[in-house]
Image (cartoon, rainbow, N blue to C red):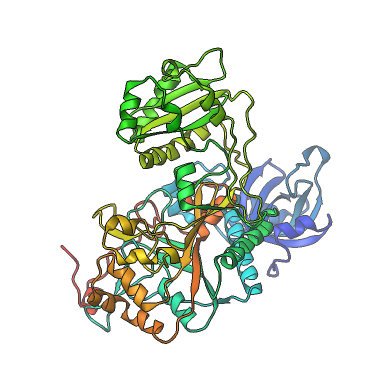
Amino acid sequence: MAELIRTHNIEQIIAAPIGTPATLMGWVHYRRDFGGLIFITLRDRWGELQCVFDPAGAPAAHAIAQGLRSECVVAFSGETRPRPEKEVRSYPGGDREFVVGQAAVLSMAEPAPFVVEEDVKAGEEIRLKYRYLDLRRRAMVRMLTIRHKAVAAIRGYLDSQGFLEIETPLLARTTPEGARDYVVPSRVHPGKFYALPQSPQLYKQILMCGGVDRYYQIAKCLRDEDLRGNRQPEHTQLDLEMSFASRDELFSVIEGAMAAVWRDCLGEELPVPFPRLSYDDAMARFGSDKPDLRFGAEIRDLTAHFAECSAEFIQNGLAEGQSVHGVFIPQASLSRKQLDEWTAEARSLGAGGLLTLELGGAELRGTLAKHITDPTPFASAGSGGVPAADSHGGQGHRPAPPSESAAGTWFMLLGPAAKNTAQLGQFRLKLGEAFSLIDKQRWEWTWVVDFPLYERDATTHEVAPAHHAFTHPLPEHLDKLLSDDPQVLLSIRADNYDLVLNGVEMCSGSLRIFDPALQRQVLRKVGMSDAQIEARFGWFLEAYRYGAPPHRGVGYGIDRLVMRILGLDNIREVIAFPKTATAVCPLTGAPAEIEDEQWRELGIRPAK
């Protein structure tokens, strides 16, 4: 028999007229033997098609089909014919079948450790160990395809905007980016080490000093940090930098790229520009710098409404400078059991308790009902709708329509204002899920801008960069850098920004410091000596001595982008070869020990 050459993939033969001759190649998905006719569902990257083997018409091909099992790699030559009317299915290719005249086995397969099917029964550990099998599933093919389309759309759009794609080194110097570096020992320079980049931050700023003006890269970034559910030791990001660009110009570029992605991947048009919220406004209204704008229930300061409240513990708290903040859930009515459950939920978030006031019934209900004589201010606050974000000409966040009766329940906390809003930010999300307030079909984008320049380090409690150490303060806050008072430093706001989609941070960026004296000043405020600054960043700051342009940029997580497009919650689903939650690759067994000879070549010894 002559060698079979593939002429069509399954998508192409499904699109071709019935009766088209072809040679198809792929994997055996299912095999059904009826004693005479044998039916095999053939699978390739593009789809599936039922193939028919008739012992009378093609005895040699039929004999081969008898010996096949799932996942064997085969070549079938024949032509399509209409399926019997009662067997027609609505899925692609369901109107036809492929009658096989010739068949060849390209590769036999042993019994697989799990069935390759959409409703896969295998656990994640097994799926990752045999990832090459898992990748054959239609869901995984779709993930890889969407990821490709998203990156292609970004590349196409940025090319149209005059950006250059430039690769930066993977072997670099260590820099403080907020996590531990992966380090690589140098064989030719004993005792010295490279660091794998947490981001191309300094290199892209050097490119701006080199006059590149507009740069981007689909960059691999690596961080040796303690892993959480949706973190990986290596991730992919769109890394982008622009010289001489205003904030509006950069936002327009990112919004245009996202509009291109949504158009190419989902066939949807995104309304641009996206709305904007200041960091302080986001924290006050949503208790989060990643606000989910798909529902209202904004946090309100209700302190003024409690001036006449008869509850002694509230008056004592107000006298101590505490505040009352709350969120209003329309139409919500709580049973005693539900009230206890929500109180326990509030306490699990660190609150001392939960205050409730239910409006709209014949009488007030809730834990504060007997202490409130005039519910009018609460009814007014509950029916006020949701203020829109600053849309800058875009669609903005649509206000919720006012409720005439303001029927519903206030969920409130008494305590320091910052603590209240932080706890209510988490509580609000739980309420939104529990009361089905979140429209899962909506895309709600917002830029959150002007974050703090510094924050308290969670471990040392010292002043540390909130974003990274190369972020430019807002011009009106530059004088505060002259202070050594931590509270003054923590009040400095920077020209930085995050893009948030449905409560998830998608990208982060800033205007970069381009004055070497200011850069040194910012680094000194986080405890670095001049000697340390010179040792770590001398090479970088030297470039600034020869004329550095104002420049700004972002890092945009590609993995998170694909997760959002596909509506997935597990980051490992959108990476072809991910690590587990313990940073292990089940497929290859990495990380692994190295040979003694490699230790000797590197001139180092493993820790005992």
Location of the C terminus (image quadrant): bottom left
Q: Is residue 394 above or below residue 157?
A: above
Please tell me which residue is depicted at 78% across the width and 41% down the height of the picture. 88
Residue 95: image location, x then y, percent: 79, 46
**Is residue 104 or residue 587 the one in the foreground?**
587
Please tell me which residue is depicted at 76% across the width and 58% down the height of the picture. 13
Residue 110 appears in the figure: no
Name which quarter of the figure residue 156 lies in.
Answer: bottom right
Name which quarter of the figure residue 545 lies in.
Answer: bottom left
Q: Is residue 205 above or below residue 238?
A: below
**Is residue 7 or residue 550 the one in the foreground?**
550
Residue 412 appears in the figure: yes
Side of 6 where 288 appears, left or right: left
Side of 392 where 54 appears, left or right: right
**Is residue 480 or residue 116 the one in the foreground?**
480
Side of 291 where 529 appears, left or right: left
Residue 488: image location, x then y, percent: 32, 57
Side of 503 where 462 appears, left or right: left
**Is residue 597 or residue 178 the one in the foreground?**
178
Location of the N terminus (image quadrant): bottom right
Specify the farthest residue to the left: 608
Residue 271: image location, x then y, percent: 67, 54
For the image shown, how many numbered marks are present on the structure?
0
Residue 61: image location, x then y, percent: 69, 56
Specify the farthest residue to the front: 308
Q: Is residue 362 above or below residue 560?
A: above
Specify the farthest residue to the bottom: 546
